[in-house]
Each structure stands twice: as C-alpha cells, then as structure tokens.
Amino acid sequence: MDRRDFLRVVLRSLPLAAGLWPRRAESGEPQNAEPAVQFVFAQLQYQGGEWDPHPLAATPLMEELMQRTSVDAGLARRVITVTDRDLFSYPFLYMAGKYEFDPFSAGEIDRLRRFLSYGGFLLADNALGQTGYGFDKSLRRELKRVLPENDLGRMPSSHAALRSYYLIRRIGGTRLVQPYLEGIQLQSFMPVIYCHNNLGGAWERDQLGNWVNPCTPGGDEQRKDAFHLGINLILYAMTENYKEDLIHVPFIRKRLTRP
C-alpha cells in the first residue's frame, strides 16, 4: 500500500470524518445523523512526561482552518494512543510535550512504524523549546527506534509542506528557538515534522477567547506565522506533494520574490 492508497482508504473511512470528500447520506441513514467532517485533529497521548501542555490549542486552529480554507473540520480534538484501534483512521497525528517520557513498548514501536510507513503523518511540537533535554531527548530516542535507518534533518525552505497553502517564510510559535523545522524523509513524503517553537502554545485560547500565552519577541505576527504553519501541515498531511508539480512551481517562485 502506498501513501495515496492509504489516504484514499483512511479519508473515506474515518469514524468522525469522511476525508476530503464529504460522505453522502444513504437511504437508510437517520435524518438527524451528525454530518461528517473532512478533518479531525488527533493528538497522541503517551506515558510519562506531559503529553498535553496546551489542552485548548486544537479548537482555535480548527476554527482558523475552516475560516481560511474549504476544509470542514471537527472543533473537538480526538485524543488517541499508539495502541488505539482507530490510529490508522487519522492521517494527521499531533504529539506535544515538555519533559522526558517513557519509552514505547516494542509493540508500540512497530505500530507507529507501520503508521508512518503506510502514509500517516506526525507533527511533533516541543513545548519546552530546549534541545537535548526533556521532550526533545525522548522524542529523538523514540524516532530512532521507530525509523532506525532515517534521521531527523533540517527541512529545506523549498519543501512542499512550507507552501501547501501559505508560503511560509518564518516558523512561528510562542518563542523563536529555531528558524527552521526538522523532518524525516521517506521516499517522496516527509511523515515526521518537528518544531521547537511551541506551536500549540501560540494556538491556544482560553474559554473567553483570550490568548493563553504570549508570543515573543514577534507578538501577533509570530502567532499568525504559527497558525499559517499549522494549516499548511494539515493540508500537507491530507494532500501530500501536489504543490511540487510543474504548474505550481512558477507561481510559487513569483510569490516568493514579493516583499
């Protein structure tokens, strides 16, 4: 099964989402059934550390996704574990943290490897922002176990994920730890993308609609960059590398030359 087949199967069979193609009501379906949505934000829960540093981050991002694109998203996130039987129903998986976490079991390693190898996507978000310590240390250890022949490397600024919707020139977040993303490449797709700038903290609003965390030193522009990146990565996970085709390249180059 290649990535296109994986997306075709997954996005048409989500329990809470019908992929990129809204599901038509069947004759026997109750009229009051909830309409299917196109995208569900799935967040990975793991043992140890702090898997949920920004519990209110998903909804503002989903609101922005629907406002800025034609994607119909569920506002509520779906919390999932590696062993959850529905893992393969979600093409996008978000993993955040601050501190070291427990190693995955051999079975969890195998399952996560299959998820990423079959076309699933993982966005890792370092909420602490320190390298070589805490979440960063554990994540690198576990990714090396999951994909031992593939290393995290600096993502090029020309990568499709940085232009799948917005043309990303700056990596936002609550702080500017690294001006670039890291990722793991498997053939033509990058199934793991890693950000050190605490994207979730920049997305998070409280129940009254106020921002929970400041974004320093760039303020509102830095927060906007974080939202733009989140939208891009969701669309990249759902559509792969379509912006690398020859039709889009001249248009993108023209846009990139603008101030």
Image (spheres, rainbow, N blue to C red):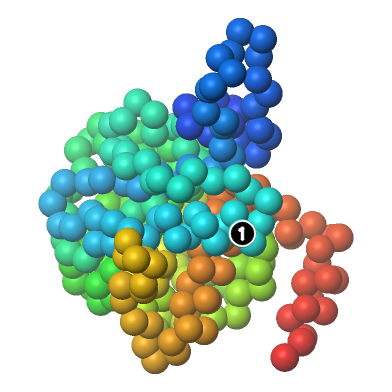
Instruction: Identify the residue shown where x is 29% and y is 69%.
Output: 127
Nearest to the observer: residue 226 or residue 10: 226
Residue 93 image point, x, y percent: 42, 47
Residue positioned most to the top: 28
Instruction: Identify the residue shown where x is 28% and y is 32%.
Output: 83
Residue 190 image point, x, y percent: 53, 55
**Three-letter amino acid code of the residue under disc 1:** Gln
Question: If the image is split into quadrants, where does the C terminus sit?
Answer: bottom right
Nearest to the observer: residue 215 or residue 154: 215
Residue neighbourhood size for the residue with mark 1, other residues' Cα within 10 Å, grouped as few (<14), some (14–19), many (≥20)? few
Which image quadrant is residue 79 in? Answer: top left
Q: Which residue is mark 1?
A: 67
- Residue 43 vs 133, above or below: the answer is above
Residue 55 image point, x, y percent: 29, 57
Q: Is residue 196 left or right of residue 193?
A: left
Q: Is residue 48 left or right of residue 82?
A: left
Residue 182 image point, x, y percent: 45, 68
Q: Can you see residue 110?
A: no
Question: If the image is split into quadrants, where does the N terminus sit?
Answer: top right
Nearest to the observer: residue 171 or residue 69: 69
Q: Is residue 29 left or right of residue 125?
A: right
Nearest to the observer: residue 110 or residue 69: 69
Disc 1 element? helix
- Residue 178 vs 124, above or below: the answer is below
